[in-house]
Image (cartoon, grey):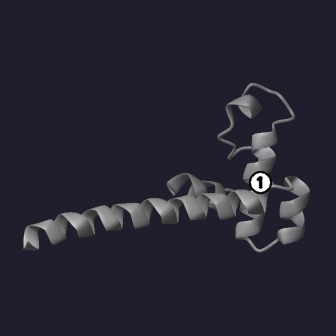
Amino acid sequence: MSGLVLVAILDPLSQMASICPINRMGFDFCPGCGLGRSVAFAARGNLEASLQSHPLGLFAIVVIVARIGAIFRRNYNINREKNHEKDI
């Protein structure tokens, strides 16, 4: 969750804020950077720039948020079952 928030708050047009090791080594192309920029643009509501940066950026957001939701639901159910066993 924190990684998604970090990517969303970074300035997608700035090279200084990049946390990409491939970018830091001096390579110009990194598909992951395009994905990060896509998420950052989407967080700012710029869907056109998001799709231009990486066509799977919006899909990645949906998958990550769905996975986070699944983890929270699983943990909620596990804790609910533990508390239910204590009541019996």
Q: Is residue 37 above or below residue 22?
A: below
Residue 40 horizontal/vertical position (percent): 72, 60
Residue highlighted by disc 1: 37
The single residue placed furthest to the top in the displayed view is: 25
**Residue 82's quadrant in the figure?**
bottom left
What residue lies at 29% left-to-right and 61% top-to-bottom? 78
Q: Amino acid at mark 1?
A: Arg
The 10 Å Cα crowd at callout 1, few under 14, some 14 to 19, many 20 or more, is many
Residue 85 horizontal/vertical position (percent): 14, 66
What residue lies at 73% left-to-right and 51% top-to-bottom? 36
What residue lies at 87% left-to-right and 61% top-to-bottom? 51
Q: Is residue 36 above or below residue 75?
A: above
Helix, strand or loop at label 1? It is: helix
Which of 48 and 84 lies nearest the eye of the viewer?
A: 84
**Seen in the image, is 70 located left or right of residue 62?**
left
Indicate the quadrant containing the C terminus: top left, top right, bottom left or bottom right. Answer: bottom left
